[in-house]
Image (cartoon, rainbow, N blue to C red):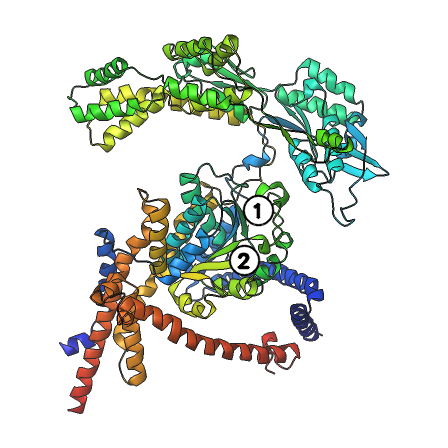
Amino acid sequence: MIDFLDKLDRRWIFLAMGLSVLIPILMKLQFPETATAQSQAVFEEIEKLKEGDPVLMAWDWDPASAGELEPMAKSFVLHCASKKLKMYFLAIYPLGNQMADNDIADVIKVDFPDLKYGEDYVNLGYKPGYEGVIKVIVNNLRELYPTDSRGTNLDQIPMCRNVNSVQDMKLIINVSSGYPGIKEWVQYASTPYKHKFKLVGGCTGVQASLMYPYIPQQLAGQLGAIKGAAEYESLVTEKYDPDSKREIYKEGRRRMGPQLIAHMLMIGLIILGNIVYFAQRSRGAA
Amino acid sequence: MKRTIPLMITAVGGILLIVATFIPATKDWGEKATIWFDILAGIAFILGGVNLLMIHLSKVSDRKKGWAYSLITLLSFLTMLFAGLFKIGSPPAPDQEFYGESFAPLTISQLPDSATFTIPGEIPATITDHIELPASVRTQMTVADGTITFRGWMRPNQLNDLIDFSDNLKWRATMEALAEKAKPQVTLTGSLDWYSDHRALSYGGVMTPEDRTSLEQMGSDAPWKSAIDQLDKLTNKKISLNVKPEDVPPAFINGDKPATVAYESSGQLTATGDMTTGTRDTLKSVFPVVRPMTPEQQQAYWQSLVDAGEKPLDDDARQTFIGILDTLWTKQQLVDIINAAGIAKPGTKSWTQLYEEQQAGVADLNPEIPAGESVTLNDAQLQAIDAYIAAPQQRISQLVINLKAAGTLTGGQQAAMTKYLSSQPTSGRLGRDLTQTLMDKNVSLDQAQLELLLGPYRSEMVWARIVERLFIASHVVKYPYSGEYNATGTPFWWMYEYIMQPLMATVFALLAFYVASAAFRAFRVKNVEASLLLGTAFIILLGRTFAGVWLTSWIDPAGPFSGFRIENMTVWIMSVINTAGNRAIFIGIALGIISTSVKVLLGVDRSYLGSDD
């Protein structure tokens, strides 16, 4: 048995991982989520805002991270749209612009048809330059964003007329999948201007542990991967969309089912691997 | 020299950014340097594209191993570049097309003198010299020698921008007076405009011979006359569609038609000039809204559905059906909405009135005008509403005429009533909603019943498509490349949505399989450090799922041992141990960056130039 496990073809492990993700999805396995302090902090920070307050939605992620970040991005938009905040989308990640467009189409246009482009939300689009973009727009938005992503002059967009820099925002919400992302927003926006606005965000599991040193002074709260997304999603839907039939607002919690089984499989594999290791070591010693 | 210039750029750029960070007076320098960095980063994308082409072209031409993959990369790159750059299949941007208006090129200098308006006035002293006039009027307005000059005709948004420019009451009153002057003559108001951003004279609707004469009298220069000629042709251009007579709703044939759309019994639907979105919407909404139903009418409608089919329908289906009909609008709702809109509200004085009051010595300026008398519907008007409910084919416009004939109807009341009634379902939409609800309740309807419910909706949709086709055909595209490169339905969007997005997500998802395999093969408890790592990994893996909560749910969350609940241990590990470790690493990295930066800025470390130094 030990020899069998030692020489186990890795394709069996791939199959087990595939099934551990597939079966919970097919069975629609879901578990209750209790919000942790971080998710609660993110929720509260948005809750503090008043109707019409400007919020910068920095969408720095791409389809590769959609598994972890898409549900939280949609929940952020749902939360802000429900509170009638002015949403300014932008991206310093090449495909962030498309992700913002997707969320606008899936959430705002479907569930908030009364919100008008240019008056309630605007997509400023993507700009290359990594953290350089943040450094400029915190002082002067128009230097790099003279137009929105459709090419309309900011002066012709009602909600942009009185916005000169990121400092005019009440809050920055960043969804980040890597570099440039949440760390850069902390270093170049919220740290030098922490008295002007707050920063909250959501990021991939890999980034989440790196962001803890910035909490809470430079980063008011963060959602770590799909777990954070599921918790935050529960908070938002409980308050603003309790009877929703739309699956997109349950996606974070739905993805926690596969995560649980996959994590259990990982723990099982690690234990099994160590049993093989100790068995062979004792056999070698004998 | 080849090395000196990059070294100099690095040193100057780096030192500038350091100086700008620590000396507030030099903040602008740092901003400018960062903008240059952003421009270079943009150029780097172009260089990256060229590099990708060179590498893969050479690989394909040399038939190196894996050249087929290079070929796929090249083809994908070029296809997306081509589709995105040339906006293949991208419709023009709706906000740049000015539907219903025709454009003729005309620069500001070619506007006739009669389109120049002056008024005495100056920019308020509180506005500093370096502040420019609002962007929307910058090219049309000049202020010099105590005179304000405006070329063209002022639009409401321009007036609002000018009012917002300064809170000085005299300035605001002056701008209001200027806006009053800077209007086309009455017969052309609402039709004639000039757009500075587009350098174009615009005309909305159809230009009549009288309008043309009025325009010709405004100026005699050749460019002006040429622009009028072009607009005359464009606004009188006729576009016809052949439509099946059975697709044209009787409500359109027998009702009031927009002046710019005509229908001939031979089956030709003709639009004159560029159709406005308002005309399009009016055409689409020719179908009358369903009137409130009495219980007898509801029963009759239900019976017609039962009789149309061969299958019996149970009482639950009837309850559902009648329940939907009960949600139709009522006479009382309509009356309440009209009366609510008739409640008088306080008005607002104009800036000119306020300025005059200020000049007259009024100390406390009150911008509010007291509310007048409220208007409610009288008995004759209520009877007009009854008549509207009793006549299913009567149009909303006819109801407005009848209400005005029977008593007072304010503009606000008319708008509120029209908005309310327009949002009510037509027989087609009601049939669709009934079908949807019955199907949601698993009520089985046969073909004849579906036809009864959905037939009117199909007719409405066919007509809506005809109107949309006519709307597009009548429009002269002004900016064909103004649309978004990734608009829904374009080839670029399709490739992104159905190729790039799934591929990226798939490649990233492979990580889970390799992590699982690596955990089984390599995560061994060989020493104390590995044991600590393993224990931490287990806690985090469990704590990030419901399993962690469930396993230690027996520990009282408010008790002294609540810290041993797995979800709390996870938080503690992340916020204490992880944070401490990360901070130490960050400080180390920061020190490393400082030392490396100093070496780079001073030219000691030149490795980034590809040097071996």
Quadrant location of the C terminus of chain A in the rendered image? bottom left
Q: Residue furthest right?
A: B145
Badge 2 crowding class, 10 Å Cα cut-off, few under 14, some 14 to 19, many 20 or more, is some
Along the polypeptide, which appears first: circle 2 or circle 1? 1
Residue plotted at (63% across, 21% down): B235
How many numbered marks does the figure carry? 2
In the visual, does B350 lie left or right of A195?
right
Circle 1 sits in a helix, a strand or a loop, which is it? loop
Query: In the image, which is nearer the foreground, mark 2 or mark 1?
Result: 2
Callout 2: residue from which chain? A
Examine the image and state in which quarter residue A282 appears: bottom left
Residue plotted at (31% across, 26% down): B432
In the visual, does B552 lie left or right of B59?
left
Vertical arrangement, residue B481 with respect to residue A55, above or below: above
Q: Which residue is mark 1?
A: A148
Residue A43 image offset from top left, x and y in percent? 41, 55
Examine the image and state in which quarter residue B430 appears: top left
Residue B504 image offset from top left, x and y in percent? 40, 57
Disc 2 marks which amino acid? Phe
Vertical arrangement, residue B454 with respect to residue B5, above or below: above
In the visual, does B392 lie left or right of B80?
left
User: CA–CA distance between discs 2 and 1?
Assistant: 22 Å
Can see residue A11? no
Determine if marks 2 and 1 fall on one subunit: yes
Task: Find residue A197 and name its label.
Answer: 2
